[in-house]
Amino acid sequence: MAEGEEIDWDSLTFSLTQTDYMYVANCELGEPWRPGQMLPYGNLEIDPAAGVLNYGQGIFEGMKAHRTVQNNVVLFRPDENARRFQKGAARLGMPPVPESMFIDAVEQVVAANSRFIPPSGRGALYVRPVLWGTGPIMGVAPAPSYTFCVFVTPVGPYFKGGLTSIELLISDEHHRAAPGGSGGVKAIGNYAPGMMPSKNAKKQGYAEVIYLDAVEHNNIEEVGAANFFCVKDNHIYTPELTGTILPGITRDSIIQLARHRGYEVTETKVSAEFAMQADEAFCCGTAAVISPIGSITHGDQKKVYMDGDVAPVTRELYNALTGVQTELAQDPFSWLHKVELNLPINMV
């Protein structure tokens, strides 16, 4: 987007808008990361034998920079993203990016692209850190070299219509992950297998697919790329972390906020049958924040929650979380990380 060109904030969707700059750093296997540089946003050159292209050796994170009602630009719990990024790298045999380097890179890219940060309440700047095995390798082994990149894009709501309920379909045919696999990290290979089930569900009028566990085929794990919650008698339930679902940062934030507000929250196995007897259900993630679930269909059964309206606990938690992120409410856990927009930029 050309310098000076106005952005129509109200037409933003969750899609890619090319911004001005990105951050790129490189590392050889077994050596420390070299300092990264800011580059104009654009294509990267990569060897066709790169580990990421041939064997899927890559991870990513999803974050948002918000412009608050105080006109501050803040990140939400970036230290947690940095730590999850490190764990994911280790799981896939890649050199972890130091936490300080990760946060510094994110801050630099946000500051360099500050003209793309929407006004408070009209969107956010989505931040995508990625780590790829870019060195060439033919045997199934860790790549010899790696690239850490951070780019951003302004986004609107993940689901069209904002805080409106969505209709979901439970899949009995497909599973997202199995015990001992990579379901607990944001590996790039976790997402392609869900594209076809998701596309088919959308053809039937559903927003997304709910995946069950791969062992008992009974317990809810995730909603596409989001974590699942349900509410029964004002008691909140969410699938426990067993290594097959992503330990979502939004998920953890909701658990802490709910307990802070007096709710009992239980992390446990949540059967499809139990979820379809609950009073409310919602899914959450960095992209979606909190999305109320209006109905769940499983085979020939359909559970409708609140007749499509946003249920009270779901709305309360949405307001509490977004209130913290935008400084409309107090930040009792010191989750906000302010970004200084006048940072010195290491520009090439």
Image (tube, rainbow, N blue to C red):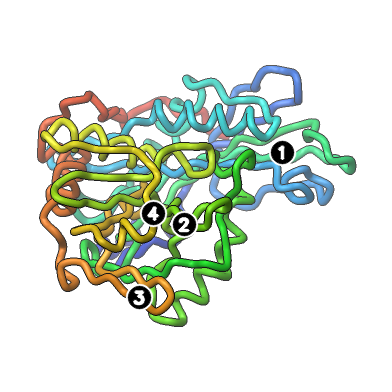
Give the labeled residue for mark 3: 301
Q: Where is residue 2 in the image (x, y as percent from the top left)?
A: 43, 59
Return the disc, 2 or 3, that comes first in the chain's sequence: 2
Q: Which amino acid does label 2 sit on?
A: Asn
Say which of marks 3 and 1 sits in front.
3
The residue that appears at 57% across and 53% down in the rendered structure is 214
Q: Quote the CA–CA distance across marks 2 and 1.
A: 36 Å
Residue farthest toward the right in the current orientation of the protein: 138
Q: Is mark 2 on a helix, strand or loop?
A: loop
Q: Give the residue pinned by disc 2.
A: 218
Residue identifier under label 1 = 133
Q: Earlier in the sequence, mark 2 or mark 1?
A: 1
Horizontal placement of 88 versus 55: left or right? left
| Amino acid found under the numbered disc labelled 1 | Gly
Identify which amino acid the numbered label 4 is placed on.
Answer: Ser
Q: Which residue is drawn at 19% across and 38% down?
A: 258
Task: Classify mark 4: helix, strand or loop.
Answer: loop
* Label of residue 271 in the image: 4
**Residue at the spot 36% in from the left edge and 72% down from the top edge:** 297
Q: Which residue is drawn at 66% across and 40% down?
A: 132
In the rendered structure, which disc, 3 or 1, sits on the residue that comes first in sequence?
1
Q: In this view, does 44 lie to the left or right of 139?
A: left
CA gap between label 2 and label 4 equals: 6 Å
Q: Disc 3 to disc 4, how far (Cα)? A: 14 Å
